[in-house]
Structures are given as C-alpha cells and as structure tokens.
Amino acid sequence: MTDHRVDLAVIGAGPAGMAAALAAAEAGVRVAVIDAGVRPGGQYWRFPAPGAGPFRPATLHHGWRRFTSTDTRLTELAGTGRVLRLAAHHVWSILPVGEQWAVHCARGAEPRQHGTGSPVAVHAARLVLATGAYDRQLPFPGWELPGVITAGGAQALLKGNLVVAGQAVVVAGTGPFLLPVADGLARYGARVAAVVEANSPLGFARFPRAVLGATGKLGEATGYAGRLLRRRVALRHRQVVLRALGTDRLTGVLVGRLGRDGRVRAGTERQIECDVLAVGWGFTPQLELALQLGCATRVDADRSLVVTVDDDQATSVAGVWAAGEATGVGGADLATVEGRIAGLAAATSLGADVVPDGRALRRRRGSLRGFAAAMRQVYPIPEAMLARCSDETLVCRCEEVDAGRIRRAVVELGATEARIVKLLARPGMGWCQGRVCGFATACLTARHAGRAVAEPDLRAFAERPIATPMPLGQLATPPGDVAADGEPGSDLQW
C-alpha cells in the first residue's frame, strides 16, 4: 500500500474542491487533492480524453480563465511540496484512525482497473468533501431505448471525447443546464431539433432581489439562449416529453404542453423526430462518503438529500467540511465560493495564519444561494411526470422493475418507506445501485404513501458502505502501514 500523510485531504477536484485546496495551501497547509478523474476540473471543467483530438476549451467551458489560474497556482504549490495531486484515485472508504482520517483509494481511470494497482491511503487531520453531483432522472415510456441518454452524458461525450451524441437531438427536462448542453451540441454540428423545458425562465420575475444578486448567472443563460435562437433552435417552454418513440432504437419523441394546473393539456401532443434524446431533471448530490462519516443531512427544496453545514461549511462531524453540490445544488460559482470558505476554515482549525476575507465571501455566497433557491422554485419537477407514470413504465432498468411493482409494494404489501420498497421489489439493487432510479423510486414511494419525500426514502439509495466498485481481493486485503509519503505511479498524478 502507498501511504501519504498530509494536513488536509480534499476529495474532489471540481470547482469547490480546487477552491478549497488552493485556499488552504496558500495559508500554509499541506493538502492532498484526490479525484477520480485523470485531469482536474470535475464534471464542470471536464478535459477531453488523451488522443481525442484538437480542442478549444473556451468554446465549451464557462469561466475557463478562472479554472486555468487556479490550476496553475495549484501546480506551482505542488512543486513546493505543499500540494499533492492524486488523479484517477477513487475514494471507497474513509475511516477514523486516532485523531486523523484514513482515506482509502483505489487507483485507475475506470472501475475495472481498480484491482490492477496497489491501494493508496491518505492520512489527514482534516477533510473537505467536494464530491459533486450526477444527473437526476425520471422514468417515462420508452426511456430505456438506445438513443435516450442523460443531458450530462451528452455533455460528457462532447467535452470528454469530442463526440457529438447524435445527428438530430432533442434536449429535454428542466433547469438552466439544458441550455449549455444544447448550445455545445449545436456548436459542434448536431441539429438540435428542440429544447423542451418543463418550466419557464419568466418565473424569475417573482424573485427580483435574487436576480439582482447574481446578474452574471442570468447573463450567462441569456447568452446561451441567444446563440440557440440564432441557430433557429426551438425553445419550447412549459412542455415535457411524454414518450420516447421507436422499437429497437429512438426515432422521435412525443411532447405535450403543461397547463396552469401542472397537467398535460389534451390535444397539445406533437411528435418531434430525432435520433438522440438528452434528458435531465437537475442533479442528485453524491453523498456516499458524507453518509459513511455520519454527517447530518436534510431534504432540500428540490427534494434532494444534502449535507447540513454551518456558516463555515463545517458538517456535524468534527474535522469535516463540505462544499459544492453536496450541500445544495447551486452551480459552479457558488461551489467555488463555498470551497474557499471551507478551505480557509479547515486551515484556521489547523492553526494556519489566515488573512480574513470572510465577510466578502459570505456576502457573495449569500447572493448566490439566494439565486440558487430561486432557481429551484422556478424549475421544479412537474408533478405530471410522476402522475403519468403508469404501472407498465419501467423505473429500475438494471433489475427491470416497473412502477406497478413499486406501487404494489406500498399499497398491497404495506411498505412505509423506500428502503422497504427496495427490499420487496428490488429497485436500486442492480449495477447502478440506485443512482439512476433511486430518486424516482423515493418519489413514487412517497406519492403512493400519500406524503412528501423524507430523508429515509432518499438515504435508501444514497448510503453505500463501499463508495465505488471494488474487487473482492482488494477488499479482503487488510490495510497495512508502509513508509510514509510513498509515491504512486506518475501516470496517476497531475
């Protein structure tokens, strides 16, 4: 086993993690930045895979200058020994060891490579969790067809592999994220047949103070929308995808308009031909490690399970801070500010001499959180998507569990929460372990039980004793103590 000893371990190298690491390192703290990606940036600033071809990052990445300046500074600090950057390191467990944390990692860009290299342990006195989020999905008839992918998947193919997902694409769901996905696809050659948005940005008119506090965010969205309109991409607001059409592959989608009551208006259905449907309903925070550690959580306004933090981004577990989407989905700008606050707070707890800039950071965080709160109210998941989920609609694709089995588990077998539904009907028991179907199962369980989604429903699909796929042989090998500061292969370091 390769063993590293540092003051602070930052898990995640997206906007929040990089900001936290830089703030702490500049304060004199020795930091390890651990990330599953082969390059820094997370999902937001995703790099193309090696050999993918020529790439102009500024055309796909908002705030690219901020990333490059942060990355350059971290690289400089790595040269002084103050920052250790561990790429392609998947954290699967964190355990307390005395007054420190032992962060256990598997190495390799993909899960099937995790057993090929020696395991890595990072021992740190403090932790910052910046684990990000992944696409949230809802089931509808035909969503299992080849050609139906997540909006984030389409974006990842484009940014990470320079691959345009299809020739004719419909981008659907809700939230501002649909706009950059459609813009990127259109810019690189796809014919975006339509952006089907369940809500309307006119809803921001109800929140003038929040908009004024984050005018840059609104300007960014306006820029995306303007470019799409210049390419004659149809922006269809207050509409949802009712069905994916096709037999062995996607050939089109059926969409309908929502009325004021949130239901699909009769007679508004229309068909749009396409070979790819990129659909997204916001994001689900990735909380496996936070829940392993016992961090307190709460249900956010968008029905996401998030980590509870205080004014310094500290969790309920001493010595652990959290920042970014894990504490509430709010975008890269908010994640960056939260990461800096967390990094400075962690450094202060270690006795570092931190130059105070807390008031300005907290004012900025307050403005961005206000905008994020408004955004969650402007772009809710329409109840029609759950109300129209018939018994025949497939919910868990791994285990082939339809909505009828979930309903019967609640109504006929007396399941009172999603964990019991999971045991009785097996949703979330397959390869993805509920990452795709968990949110929908929790919502359907609560709906059939006649109540709101609760923490136990969401925890049923978020709690995992092993946070990433691991070979049994490596799990069976007891962690050993080897010489400190051993170095992993250079191909796994930035």
Image (spheres, grey):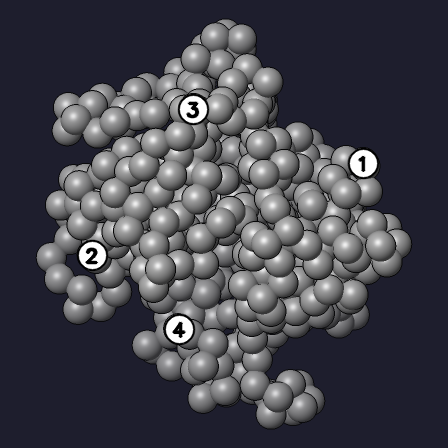
Residue type, numbered disc 3: Gly
Camera-nearest residue between 276 and 152:
276
Q: Which mark is residue 109?
A: 4
Residue type, numbered disc 1: Arg
Q: Earlier in the sequence, mark 1 or mark 4?
A: 4
Q: Earlier in the sequence, mark 4 or mark 2?
A: 4
Bin the neighbour count of mark 2 within 10 Å (Cα to Cα): few under 14, some 14-19, many 20 and up: some
Q: Secondary structure at mark 2?
A: loop
Bin the neighbour count of mark 3 within 10 Å (Cα to Cα): few under 14, some 14-19, many 20 and up: few
Image position of 259 with respect to 307: above or below: above
- Are the residues at dot 3 and dot 1 in contact (C-beta closer than 8 Å)? no
Q: Earlier in the sequence, mark 2 or mark 3?
A: 2
Residue 393 image offset from top left, x and y in percent? 57, 52
Mark 3 vs mark 1, CA separation in Å: 31 Å
Residue type, numbered disc 4: Ala
- Are the residues at dot 2 and dot 3 in contact (C-beta closer than 8 Å)? no
Image position of 136 with respect to 87: above or below: above
Camera-nearest residue between 352 and 279:
279
* Residue that carries the numbered disc 3 in the rendered image: 267
Residue 39 quadrant: bottom left
Circle nearer the viewer, 3 or 1: 3
Mark 1 vs mark 4, CA separation in Å: 41 Å
Q: Residue at x 73, y 64 (%)?
A: 425
Mark 1 vs mark 2, CA separation in Å: 44 Å
The answer to whether residue 21 is left or right of residue 48 is: right
* Residue that carries the numbered disc 2 in the rendered image: 162
Q: Which mark is residue 451?
A: 1
